[in-house]
Amino acid sequence: MLAPACGDDTGAATANMASNVNVTDDEPEGGLTEDESESDSVGTTTAEPEPFVPVPAVGGIELEWVEANQGIGVAIGRDGAGVGGADRTSYLLQNRLTLVRAFWKKLPEDWVPREIEARLIISGYPEGEKVLKSKAVVEGESFVGNLEKSFYWGLMPAEVIPGLKYRIELWETEKGWAQIDPSTQPGKNPPNLPLSGNTFIGVEDSYQIMKVTIVPYNYNFGECKTTPDTSAEQMKRFENYMFMMNPIEKLEITMHEPIDWQGELTNFGQLNQFMVDLRQQDGAPPEQYYFGYVDVCSGGLGGAGGQAIDIPSGASKSDAWKRISSGLSLPGNPEYAAETFVHEVGHSQGRYHIACSGEAGTDNTYPIPGGDIGEWGFGIVNFKLYHPTVHKDYMTYCHPVWASTFGWNKVYPTIQQLSSWDMDGAPAPEDDGAILLGMVYPDGTESWVTTPGAVDEANLSAVQNVEFFAGGEQLAVHAAEVRPQPDSDVVNIVVRLPEGFDDVTQIARVADGKRTVTKAEHIKISHKYRSLPLTNE
């Protein structure tokens, strides 16, 4: 387990080398005479040994690079200097537990393996400089996949603030000094990083928060009468997985009152469309994610273990309805449910699949073949390291999974934007009007709901539209967005509500010359508030 390093107010020690040899007084010249009694004799005495005074590490050891890891590794020092912002691979958040590690260069051939102390000296705190210490037996190559083959320190969330600078110094220890020749010379460069002065850790002045509402469904169909696993242990697993794999400093998970679902579920789209209505009637803020959670007595629903209603293309308040997804509760496989939670909410954050095992709808800009995460990950809750080629990005269908640098950077600005709404206390989406959202299922059936939102005018179809009728008169014809749902054969149809929608008596979806009519009474009205019972009926 990684323990937070303790602060130490000790300043830099003197650079003078100290001999660690016991000193013994000489006997009187000639020894004892026959006439001297034993009581008159002057015996041999032993003085106290001189205390060991630490000195900078000798023998040519140098530091190669320094990493800060809050989930994914970010190099903050290399080649004797700090790594500037333009050369950083990702962001470092404030108020998030951080593992700092230092790795030594290839050792000289005559290096004597021994214990070395590394001091992480951090400035920028209101109370003054902090000195954190880490000891390691330096032998062989340093290795990022083994904590013991590096120097490491843990910074607690309150210690991770903007404006911090650091330097790392290597010092001999009393235990190690006893193993070498005291005349061993220092290397050509100081055993420090940076070689002189200090450099920025690079903590962002950030506010990164996620809010998720979990909606458990009590399912009742035929012989399947279930409630999902909402035990304290499982909900903690959900929390830990989401928190560790997202660039956030705070995660708020709210458990919704259970929804009684009567009748057969054949597709996650049914749950997700219900939650379009539910989140609106709950008065949920636009930054809130909704996640449905159900046990259907099967390992899949509609051929999937989870599904998001859509994938937002940005961070817009009018896309609040797209921040909805669902997943299965599988008895005996709680880890799968927790990983599905992260994966599906990942879609709601704007992420597409990453290619690994035949996934559809992949992000072809992902830089690493096979979905490998590419860098060593670190769990800030469980203190585990995650292998860069064994673990795959959590948006693959492969296993095991972790966060990649690519994914971290994808969701960071989205979380940043949504977090700004939380700071503003935004009560609802912008007044962009309302939309009619239809879902066309593989069997040809359709379901429709209204909700606050806006269409993407640049993504309207030239061949699909929706006609609105008031009595026998055509009120409007609006071009539709056609948006296939991720992980599903269901297709979303999105159109802007026309003025006078309250007078609409029926609609007709027109596609490829075919018209499918839906009566107004079968459209769920969700863009206006009303009291909603905790059941799908």
Image: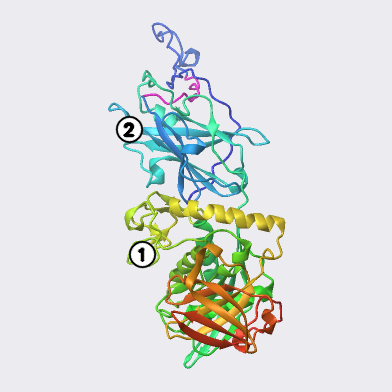
In the drawing, does residue 391 fall left or right of residue 531? Answer: left
Residue stretch in magenta: 46-59
Q: Residue at x 40, y 27 (%)?
A: 177
Secondary structure at numbered mark 1: loop
Residue 392 coordinates in the image, percent (x, y): 38, 58
How many numbered circles does the render carry?
A: 2
Identify the image quadrant of the C terminus.
bottom right
Q: Residue at x 60, y 60 (%)?
A: 316
Q: Residue at x 53, y 24 (%)?
A: 13
Kind of residue indicated by mark 2:
Lys
**414 up-or-down from 325: above or below:** above
- In this view, the residue in front, 374 or 519, is 519
Residue 532 coordinates in the image, percent (x, y): 68, 82
Q: Is residue 311 visible?
A: no
Secondary structure at numbered mark 2: loop
Q: Is residue 163 visible?
A: yes
**441 up-or-down from 127: above or below:** below
Kind of residue indicated by mark 1:
Cys
Residue 134 coordinates in the image, percent (x, y): 48, 38
Q: Residue at x 42, y 11 (%)?
A: 27
Q: Which residue does the numbered mark 2 point to in the structure image?
A: 106
- What separation in Å lies between label 1 and label 2 (alpha carbons)? 35 Å
State the residue lying farthest toward the front: 473
Q: Which residue does the numbered mark 1 point to in the structure image?
A: 398
Label 2 crowding class (10 Å Cα cut-off): few <14, some 14-19, many 20+?
Answer: some
In the drawing, does residue 404 fall left or right of residue 279? Answer: left
Label 1 crowding class (10 Å Cα cut-off): few <14, some 14-19, many 20+?
Answer: some
Q: Is residue 56 magenta?
A: yes
